[in-house]
Every structure is written in structure tokens, then in C-alpha cells.
Amino acid sequence: MSSIQPVTKQFILQSRLFNNVLEGIEDRKGSDRLSDYVNHLQWIAGHLTNSRYHLGSAIGLNAHFPYAEAYTDLSQPPPHNRAIDPSVKYPSLTEIKKSWNEFAAGFAEKISALSSEHLESETPVRVPTGKTLSDLLTFIASHESYHIGQMSIIRKSLGLPAMSYK
């Protein structure tokens, strides 16, 4: 088994959990915030989807998240993340989930097929885990898990049952 397979499995799991955490949440609830200090579901889900699409270019996928401009600020240092902005019209949860799911299968397959040489190549983006593509993938897997956990808390605050792991 390649050293990247555990990370690939994590991305596959998170593809499912992303859908599970949003299950049953109406689009109109996507912009509800717990407080002014907490991002809403439309921002978090879009940020995660934008991150996956952005990472896709580093692994050889040629796809564009149609709502990237809502989550990207080129005046910020890489990876150019835009903070939540009340003046931005974010896409609905339905639109975000559609983009996530269109990208998810090919994303995991592409990661699984990466060569050891590609995985050990340096990336222009430095992350706390290191400077190689393998380090970047490991960090983004953790990043997704973190944000899915945030979405799970928001889900519960909306009065819905806990996210399913099935």
C-alpha cells in the first residue's frame, strides 16, 4: 500500500461526512450564524469546496469551483482565502454540495494514483506539516476534518440530530 492511501481514505470519508453533516439542512438555514464570531454553513462548506478545487490543481486536476470568487481574495497571501463577508452573496448549500460531489470521486482517485516522486515534490504553499505535496495533502485532510466538526456543531444548534457516520 502506498504511503498516501491512509490520507486518501480520509478524503473519501470526509466526502461522505460533508454530505452527512449537511443532510436535512434547508438552504435558507445556510446563512444562519451562531454569533457574529462564527462562520455560517454557506461560508464553511464553500470554503472547504474551494480548498479542494484549489488543491486539485496541485495534483493535476483541471476543474474550477464556479463560486471560487466568493471564497478567494488574491490580495491575501497564499492560499488567498477570503474571510466571511456580509456583502458577499454566497451560493446555496445545494449548489455547494453539487460542486463538492462532482469533484469528490475524481479527487480521491487522483490522490490515490500519485507517484512517490510527485508526493515528495515541494509545493509553493508551506503548511505546518511540511513543504511536500504529501505534507500539503495531510494538512488539508486535517483542515477538512476540523471544518466538518464546526459544521456538526452548527447542525446541532439548528435542532437537528447529530451527523451520521454511515
Image (cartoon, rainbow, N blue to C red):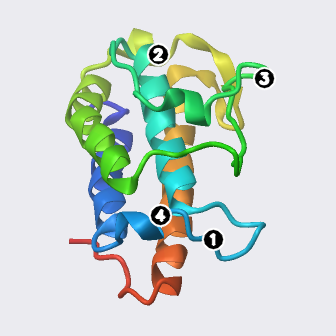
The numbered mark, 2 or 4, whose residue comes first in the sequence reads 4
* Crowding at mark 3 (Cα within 10 Å: few <14, some 14-19, many 20+): few
Total number of numbered labels?
Answer: 4
Image depth: mark 2 or mark 4 in front:
4
Going 73% across and 74% down the picture, which residue do you hit? 35
Whole-Å distance between the Cαs marked 2 and 3? Answer: 17 Å
Question: Are circles 1 and 3 on residues that touch, CB within 8 Å?
Answer: no
| Position above or below: 78 against 98 | above
Q: Amino acid at mark 1?
A: Arg
User: Image quadrant of residue 129?
Assistant: top right
The secondary structure type at the circle numbered 4 is: loop
Q: Amino acid at mark 4?
A: Gly
Image depth: mark 1 or mark 2 in front:
1
**Is there any visible trace of residue 135 in the rendered image?**
no
> Which residue in the structure is indicated by mark 3?
77
Image depth: mark 1 or mark 3 in front:
1
* Crowding at mark 2 (Cα within 10 Å: few <14, some 14-19, many 20+): some
> Which residue in the structure is indicated by mark 4?
30
Q: Amino acid at mark 2?
A: Ala
**Residue 155: image x %, image y %?**
46, 77
Whole-Å distance between the Cαs marked 3 and 4? Answer: 28 Å
**Residue 148: image x %, image y %?**
48, 61
Question: Are circles 1 and 2 on residues that touch, CB within 8 Å?
Answer: no
Picture disc at residue 33: 1
> Which residue in the structure is indicated by mark 2?
58
